[in-house]
Amino acid sequence: MVADPEIDTRPDATVGAHDAAAAQRPPVQRRRTSLARRMWRYRTLYLMALPGIVYFLVFKYLPMGGLIISFQEYRPFLGILGSPWVGFEHFVRLFTEDTFFMLLRNTLVLSLLLMLISFPVPIVLALLLNELRSKIFQRSVQTIIYIPHFMSWVIVVSIFYVMLTTDSGAINNLIVALGGEPIGFLTDPDWLRPMYVFQHVWRTAGWGTIVYLAALTAVDMSLYEAAEIDGANRWKQTWHITLPAIRATIIVLFILSIGDFLELGFEHMFLLLNSMNREVGEIFDTFVYTAGIQNGQLSFATAVGLFKGLVGLILVVGANSLAKRLGEEGVY
Amino acid sequence: MMQRRTLLKSLPLAAAGLAGAGALTSCGSSGSGGEGGSNGELTWMSVVHTPTTPEASGPVETGLKEMTGASFSYQWVPDASKEEKVNAALASSSVADITTLNQLVMPSIRSALTSGLFWDVEEHLAEFPNLARINEAVIAGAKVDGALYGVPFQQPLARYGVLVRKDWLDRLGLEVPHTVEALGEVAQAFTEGDPTGTGAATTGFIDRAESFAVGFRSLAGYFGAGCKFELDPSGKVVPTFTTDAFKEAMEWYRNAYANGWVNQEFVTMQKQNQEQAIAQDKGGIVVTGLFSGRGYTTLAESIDPETEVEWALINDMTYADVPRRIVSDTGGGMGGLMSFSTQSLSTEDDLHRALSLIDALMEPDCHLLMSNGVEGTHFEKDANGAIEIIDQTLWEQQIQPYAGSIPTNDDTPLYRSTDEMVNLANELISENDEYAVIDVSQPLTSVAYDTSWGTIHQAVNDAYNQYMVGQIDMAGFEDVVDQQRSAGMDDVIAEFTASYESTL
């Protein structure tokens, strides 16, 4: 694609010319013509953005039209146009059923646990790896810890199943050999959350570390030299130089992870769920699946999904404006 | 500059926020619909029970295309996820030309059937020689709301029984049990004794996650519980889990579990793991289809060719003074429907093209190919015409996957096998017919059932599992059942009862 020379080479001149032209016209007319003109002037940029815009329109915005079925009693054969309208009936059902509070509680608790435990782990790992002297050792550790990222949840959960089952799983065999009672990791509701968080950390921490390590390479080495001359030890250097340097990265990733706040990942939890631990393990994602796809209550499941999406949106916007108020960049 | 920046940057964000909500509605758009209209290739969405799907270029499909002269292709759905796949296809109205629907009792399928997505084929059957000979009783059982929305699969009424390790019984000096009481003693002996002779830890029952819907349901039948729904003494159609017989069975099984006679983590055990555990001598009693013995033996032989494993197949288990009975596992002999989409097969001509394919598949040659394969490659016939599978591995890869796609009628031959266990299982299954207990609700209709049964069933299933492992007691289970009354169960009972009375 040929770049527009005006944009690439003389940005200042463009703005200058634009201002000069605007000064000669009345203000109202100026706004209208300048938008069309500017779109024409930057047509190459718009052209380049087009595939992305089309992608979001087709795959993200267009399907949202389907949300309308959450206000209907959707029957596939009758279609969206033919299904009877029921207004907020499904939402009333959602908010009045006991299930709702169980879902909300489970989703919030697990999300908070992930924020508190799973989010900081990559930062700590990155800081530790950064302090290593031997580059070869650092690289190999880094590679090994991000290997789990490439395993699907099915594999991760299967590995844990084989190790944790009370019917001769490795861990329980060890516990029994040491004289203990076997622990029902897979069925005991008290073990579900620790197990979920542990698996999440195991699978995702290594991958997250890479982002922070990349941010760390951008830190100006002369800052460390100066700090050393001033007598700062390693710990002080980390606290006063390294962490502030990657603060922006941490905040952006934090806001993005809030976006996933209610998006715990259907697959992971679905594989861990069973009758014993459903009380603490059923989350919005798994409920939407069971209610919608397995039991065919499409409208109700869509209503649940819509509610979850709205809460996620509010949280992201809230976190972003909080970050801005604290003087940080934010994501938009 | 600012204007454009905001616009572009806020796009993905808003999308990310609502993507979760959109996911459900968008998932159907990728489904591939049927294209059977105007002489295209017919598509058939069918269920496969084996871990892998067969090659489309394999001997069965090539052979069938040659014999029938029709052009068609399968879309395979794994048995374990058939509910999801069928629901997703229904939700997006992108069903194949022919769809195999095994679970007619599944609420979403009932509502799809009655909303006109599939052809009512009853009047068309007479035009096809093989379809015309489908058993009347099977057709009656396959109707939903009085209409026949597809060609029914004909199956035995009840295929279940109890399988017990014969070689273990012999080693411990025990008789083959024919009562539930004796079965309990065997389970205890298998758990506490040393049936393998190696000192390895063993148990009685090997059950799995679907216990409530599959194995235990059959066991509860021996105690007098019905098949999913039954008529209570006052003439109401009630779910079996509300009956005393069902609860008595639960108490019996709970006691077995508490004594260690059932594998302790059956709640997390999947079908494949169950088969592995059985083959690895973890336990010696399985409540399952009588035909499963053959598969268990094959699997054990693949682990140790010298294995002495031998299964006793029991179809006459009784409890106390309850007469011999067995609950149907095939929906009363109706193994499901092959349904025809009204959307992709828009004209009667299209429908006839699809029906004639199914009709042709009932021809003996096609049937032989789909069940046993190619003579000389997969099987040999001995002097008496009995069939011996000569290449088990090849048969499992190329032929077995079609087991769920074989249309049958009254004339369909039952092949005699050189494997005595297969013949014995077939005999025992046909003996079951006389004692079979069928779900009374199957031909009945209830709107409440369609909308709320999925949730009710899951809640009770969870409560059953919790009771079994001791998380809650019987009062806790009854509480859960009572909660379901206000969650739609009472409506289901009332509507089924009204529907039942109107058929009298």
Image (spheres, rainbow, N blue to C red):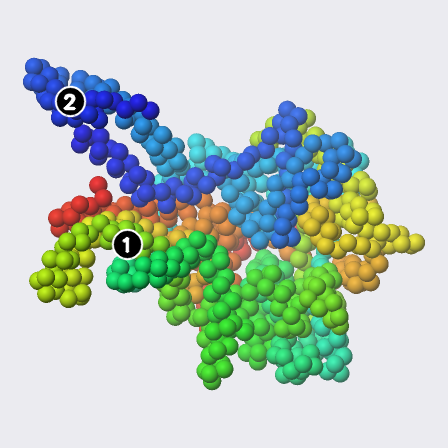
The residue pinned by badge 1 equals A213
Whole-percent x and y of residue B99? 62, 40
Q: Position of residue A57 (x, y in %)?
A: 35, 32
Which three-letter amino acid code belongs to the residue tagged 2?
Thr
Mark 1, mark 2: which one is toward the viewer? 1
Q: Find residue B129 and report its horizontal and vertical position in percent.
A: 80, 36
Chain under callout 2: A
Q: Residue at x 83, y 55 (%)?
A: B388
**What chain is tagged by disc 1?**
A
Q: Please determine whether, in this image, residue B230 is positioned above or below residue B336.
A: below
Q: In the drawing, does residue B252 fall left or right of residue B65?
A: left
Residues beneath discs 1 and 2 located on the same chain:
yes
Q: Give how far across and how far down residue B322 sits, in percent.
A: 69, 71
> Looking at this view, is A270 or B251 the one in front?
A270
- Quadrant housing the N terminus of chain B: top left
The residue under the point 35% across, 47% down is: A91
Residue pointed to by mark 2? A14
- Residue type for callout 1: Leu
On the rendered structure, is A152 left or right of B69? Answer: left
Front one among B30 and B390:
B390
The numbered mark, 1 or 2, whose residue comes first in the sequence reads: 2
Q: Residues within 10 Å of mark 1 (few under 14, many from 20)?
A: some
Instruction: Choose top left, top right, bottom left or bottom right for residue A30.
Output: top left
- SS under mark 1: helix
Residue A105: name its quadrant.
bottom left
Circles 1, 2 touching at the beta carbon (< 8 Å): no
Residue shown at the point (42%, 47%) measured from the top left: A301
Secondary structure of the residue carrying tag 2 is: helix
Q: How far is the residue under mark 1 from the one under mark 2?
A: 39 Å
